[in-house]
Amino acid sequence: SPKLFIYDLDGVITDTAEFHYLAWKKLADELGIPIDRHFNEQLKGINRMDSLDRILGQATSPIDFSEQEKIGLATRKNGYYLELIEAINPNYILPGIGDFLEANKQSGIKIALGSASKNAARILDKLELTGYFDYIVNAAEITKGKPDPETFTAAADALNIPYSDCVGIEDAAAGVEAVNRAGMFSVGVGDDAHLSHADYLVGNTQELEFQKILDEFENN
Ligand code: G16
Ligand code: MG
């Protein structure tokens, strides 16, 4: 059986995508760049600076910002985001995830967080889930974001566990690709249209069953 489960945060444990969207939307409005919720789909799992680049790419006439100015814009967005996530509490844990983490813990199989978010530790604290985690990947130390496998391999390396003994749970296409490229067993949560490359797929977090994933892992 696997030795480590690595969880994505946004879209798997809680739904911060809407808060990211509202914060980016406020910044984009200030810059006169049109973005909508449909466009926001492609920011899921993508790190802060790469998200900013994609948003700037939506400008109707190109705007040329220096690296310093871009860092300023990303910092401004994060300020808006931090205000919004103040509201997060354990009621924001996605359906079924509490029981799933409990089953994972009871099994003795290790638990890590593989999020692209630099705010991940703060959000886990607000959800009161920090105690479940053996390791939290520090997004600030990841040089290549998802779909690069580094976020997931960093967790396995820190806990000294072979990649082939790991399961990665992801809601984003870029995240499932990262898990696959790490040589880990990928569990997708969401739409078949985006996540058909997952080794095992469920429609939503409520459909995640711990024992079922252990079985699928063995049959793989
Ligand atoms: C999350 C979100 C992304 C966000 C990224 C960075 O990734 O899905 O939209 O851009 O974190 O967040 P921050 O600006 O807080 O560092 P994940 O990997 O948890 O799905
Ligand atoms: Mg995600």
Image: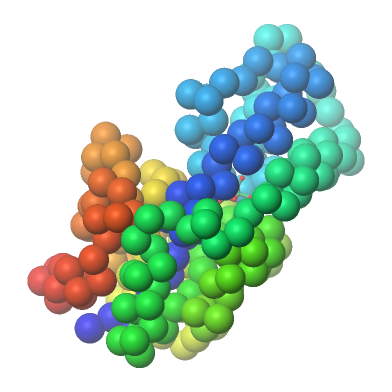
Q: Name the residue furthest top.
A: 61
Q: Position of residue 186 (x, y in %)?
A: 30, 61
Which residue is depicted at the point 72% across and 52% down?
A: 86
Which residue is depicted at the point 44% across and 65% down?
A: 7
Left or right placement of residue 178 versus residue 115 in this view:
left
Q: Name the residue furthest front.
A: 91
- From the viewer's perspective, is residue 195 above or below residue 149? above
Q: Nearer the viewer, residue 68 or 168?
A: 168
- Tell me the quarter of the picture where residue 21 sits: top right
Which residue is depicted at the point 35% across and 70% down?
A: 99
Q: Nearer the viewer, residue 17 or 53?
A: 17
Quarter of the figure that contains the C terminus: bottom left
Q: Looking at the image, can residue 144 be seen?
A: no
Q: Name the residue furthest left.
A: 219
Quarter of the figure that contains the N terminus: bottom left
Left or right placement of residue 209 versus residue 157 in this view:
left
Q: Position of residue 199 (x, y in %)?
A: 22, 57
- From the viewer's perspective, is residue 92 above or below residue 194? below
Q: Position of residue 146 (x, y in %)?
A: 51, 52
The number of numbered badges drawn on the structure is 0
Q: Position of residue 80 (x, y in %)?
A: 78, 40
Left or right placement of residue 156 versus residue 186 in this view:
right
Q: Nearer the viewer, residue 137 or 87?
A: 87
- Tell me the quarter of the picture where residue 65 sits: top right
- From the viewer's perspective, is residue 13 above or below residue 166? above
- Tell me the quarter of the picture where residue 104 sits: bottom left
Q: Looking at the image, can residue 190 be seen?
A: yes
Q: How is the image coloured?
A: rainbow
Which residue is depicted at the point 39% across and 83% down?
A: 105
